């Protein structure tokens, strides 16, 4: 029988159901142990100390007052973490054209047998600086779960009245002998949550939990992925389908009217397991991608955490999701040329076998090329922190520099490349965080992982990465039942969120990503189940939420099920991302600006120039009326010859002027864009 793990909708319901029967226990000598990890040395690529946020969020005791710093806004309290769990669902959305941000979450209502049976929306109209009051329940079903939200504005209108809010959520259905997922509901509403239009995914088949909502402004469509359920018994078919909406989420239909799945678990070889399905649609709507981590097993029951055999697997549609290949394309880290040090030796991808989570996300850029966000390591031996120190006294002294890195794997034409984004401080994203005991007596580990997510700007020429990692102090997150039969929760591993970004025209390994920036500085709160809005603001604003996990007002039978606070991180912004300027020669020369090549061009062209001395240099583009339409770059440059790629994908055909200024020198030339 085929053995595989499928994350997201196929597995998450099983995981959630099992979690409700678990008790979390800790070997007596290790309760509440705190250990310190040696700080990792910075890489050469990290040129300065990451910026610290202005403040931090402070955990409160139950029923006491809460103090928040100016970097955190409390969106609301949820019935449990499963309102935001799921690597590839998204409860936050941004529309850069109107500065609107929305967050959706389950409520904390616990009347009678009801547990969070409402969906609440919070809305900001100023990029998250201030927030309106929580909305009334927007769901029209009895037990809504796992919502997704998106802001639909294909014309990029600056009028909020032109924006539609699209929401998806699943619903439990009763089958002969069982109740499980089987229905997906949709809601389209105006920006102010009026004018609601409700609908459901067409059946048969029935449906599990939909993934995040995607969009193509050019095609004027929304998309999502959902796996099918057999209508007669509620069992998963293992088939995933591509859905689209042509009316802003008012209704949804299969992209392929012949009801052919985009992907089937039958495509998975016998020696492979599937981790963390994710997908995206190109900005122009011509391509769609469906990717996962392909975990390779050498023998039955054996699965290394880190392996050079693991690969990125993806299926790509070249007709907007109508048809899909049946064989994946594989990307093995070892097959990527010119890997940067230290990943040029024995580098492999990681997986978490128990929870079916591999660090992965995918996004398309303006060139319709995909970028994969993964964790890569050269340490193939799982490191067990409990093996160090004296378990009888609870004293641990861990000195360990982890060789794990957050990496961008990109495609350009038929070639692949790898960029280092950040070195990760971690007790391996694939090592134990705590051990749970199910009602059957079986034990399995919960795991730490890095929650990587992409965001992209409207022009699709800037990409942004978000991730979480442990700080230098590790706290084991165990829980146990005390003598009064009460659940006692110990502090969780401290994790904080980080971000970085780059221009997609940047070149070279290790040098094009901005310095990683730490955006939370919590010492008592675990930043967990983070999500980032797909679109970043036009000025680099990023919109991120996280769940304060593990301690709430009501102790359920598992830390995952207790009440949780949902936080929005205010003021996250990455500035100054522009196209990378490539140095051709270090030899100084006379100040000159060459004619762009090719000319005429469509849509990009290369501009070369020479500087006699180092200094602040800017290259700007103007239309025929003399209005500035683009700043290609504005930065300090060294003496010598440089070149930069200018992309005019979003400009109309016509004649443009490009002007180079450096010190007292300036020069202007014309170029012609023909589309």
Image: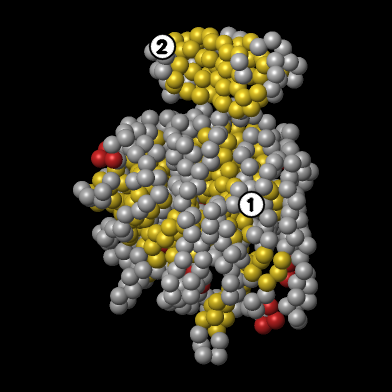
Rendering coords of residue 263 (x, y %): 48, 45
Rendering coords of residue 427 (x, y %): 68, 61
Quadrant of residue 35 in the image? bottom right
Rendering coords of residue 550 (x, y %): 51, 70
Task: Name the residue nearer the viewer: 545 or 142.
Answer: 545
Residue extending furthest toward the front: 664
Measuring 69% from the left and 10% from the top, which residue is drawn there? 590
Quadrant into which the N terminus falls: bottom right
Q: Which residue is mark 2?
A: 624
Measuring 49% from the left and 39% from the top, which residue is drawn there? 540
When the figure is inspected, residue 154 is found, relative to residue 167, above or below; the finding is: above
Measuring 65% from the left and 11% from the top, which residue is drawn there? 591
Mark 2: secondary structure: loop
Q: Which residue is mark 1?
A: 295
**Res. 89 visible in picture:** no
**Res. 491 visible in picture:** yes
Label 2 crowding class (10 Å Cα cut-off): few <14, some 14-19, many 20+? few
Say which label, 1 or 2, has the lower sequence index: 1
Measuring 51% from the left and 88% from the top, which residue is drawn there? 485
Quadrant of residue 634 in the image? top right
Quadrant into which the C terminus falls: top left
When the figure is inspected, residue 329 is found, relative to residue 116, above or below; the finding is: above
Mark 1: secondary structure: strand
Task: Name the residue nearer the viewer: 219 or 310.
Answer: 219
Label 1 crowding class (10 Å Cα cut-off): few <14, some 14-19, many 20+? many
Residue 134 shows which numbered tag? Answer: none
* Count of numbered tags: 2
Rendering coords of residue 71 (x, y %): 49, 55
Q: From mark 1 to mark 2, how far is it between C-alphas?
A: 55 Å
């Amino acid at each position: 029988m085929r053995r595989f793990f499928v994350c997201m909708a196929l597995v998450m319901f099983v995981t959630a159901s099992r979690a409700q029967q678990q008790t979390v226990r800790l070997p007596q000598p290790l309760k509440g142990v705190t250990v310190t990890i040696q700080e990792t040395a910075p890489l050469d690529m990290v040129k300065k100390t990451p910026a610290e946020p202005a403040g931090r969020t402070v955990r409160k005791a139950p029923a006491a007052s809460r103090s928040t710093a100016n970097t955190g806004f409390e969106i609301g309290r949820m019935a449990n973490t499963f309102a935001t769990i799921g690597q590839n669902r998204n409860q936050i959305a941004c529309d850069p054209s109107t500065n609107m941000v929305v967050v959706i979450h389950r409520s904390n209502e616990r009347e009678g047998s009801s547990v969070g049976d409402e969906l609440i929306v919070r809305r900001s109209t100023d990029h998250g600086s201030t927030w309106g009051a929580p909305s009334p329940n927007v769901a029209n079903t009895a037990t809504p779960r796992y919502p997704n939200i998106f802001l639909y504005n294909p014309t990029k209108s600056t009028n909020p009245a032109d924006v539609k809010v699209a929401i998806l959520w699943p619903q439990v259905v009763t089958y002969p002998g069982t109740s499980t997922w089987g229905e997906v509901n949709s809601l389209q509403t105006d920006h102010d949550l009026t004018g609601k239009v409700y609908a459901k995914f067409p059946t048969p088949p029935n449906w599990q939990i939909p993934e995040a909502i995607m969009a193509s402004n050019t095609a004027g469509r929304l998309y999502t992925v959902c796996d099918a359920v057999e209508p007669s018994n509620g069992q998963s078919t293992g088939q995933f389908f591509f859905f689209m909406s042509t009316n802003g989420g008012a209704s949804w239909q299969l992209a392929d009217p012949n009801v052919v799945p985009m992907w089937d678990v039958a495509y998975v070889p016998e020696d492979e397991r599937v981790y963390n399905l994710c997908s995206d649609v190109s900005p122009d709507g011509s391509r769609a991608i469906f990717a996962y981590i392909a975990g390779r097993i050498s023998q039955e029951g054996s699965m290394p955490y880190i392996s050079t055999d693991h690969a990125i697997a993806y299926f790509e549609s070249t007709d907007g999701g109508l048809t899909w290949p049946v064989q994946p394309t594989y990307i093995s880290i070892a097959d990527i040329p010119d890997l940067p040090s230290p990943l040029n030796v024995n580098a492999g991808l990681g997986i978490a076998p128990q929870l079916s989570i591999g660090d992965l996300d995918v996004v398309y850029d303006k060139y319709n090329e995909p970028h994969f966000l993964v964790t890569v390591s050269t340490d193939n031996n799982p490191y067990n922190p409990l093996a160090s120190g004296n378990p009888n006294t609870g004293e641990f002294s861990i000195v360990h520099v982890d060789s794990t890195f957050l990496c961008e794997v990109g495609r350009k034409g038929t070639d692949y490349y790898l960029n280092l984004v950040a070195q990760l401080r971690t007790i391996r994203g694939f090592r134990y965080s705590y051990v749970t005991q199910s009602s059957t007596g079986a034990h399995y580990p919960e795991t730490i992982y890095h929650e990587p997510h992409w965001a992209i700007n409207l022009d699709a020429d800037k990409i942004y990465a978000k991730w979480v990692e442990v700080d230098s102090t590790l706290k084991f997150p165990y829980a146990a039942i005390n003598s009064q039969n009460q659940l006692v929760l110990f502090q969780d591993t401290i994790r904080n969120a980080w971000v970085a970004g780059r221009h997609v025209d940047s070149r070279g390994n290790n040098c094009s990503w901005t310095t990683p920036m730490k955006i939370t500085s919590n010492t008592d709160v675990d930043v967990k189940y983070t999500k980032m809005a797909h679109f970043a603001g036009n000025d680099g604003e990023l919109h991120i939420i996280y769940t304060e996990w593990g301690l709430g007002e009501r102790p359920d039978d598992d830390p995952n099920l207790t009440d949780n606070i949902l936080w929005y991180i205010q003021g996250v912004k990455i500035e100054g991302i522009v196209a990378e300027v490539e140095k051709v020669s270090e030899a100084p020369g006379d100040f000159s600006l060459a004619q762009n090549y090719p000319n005429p061009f469509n849509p990009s062209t290369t501009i070369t120039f020479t500087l006699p001395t180092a200094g602040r240099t800017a290259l700007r583009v103007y239309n025929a009326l003399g209005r500035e339409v683009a700043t290609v770059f504005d930065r300090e440059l060294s003496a010598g010859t440089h070149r930069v790629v200018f992309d005019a994908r979003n400009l109309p055909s016509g004649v443009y002027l490009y002007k180079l200024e450096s010190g007292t020198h300036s020069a202007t030339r014309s170029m012609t864009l023909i589309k």
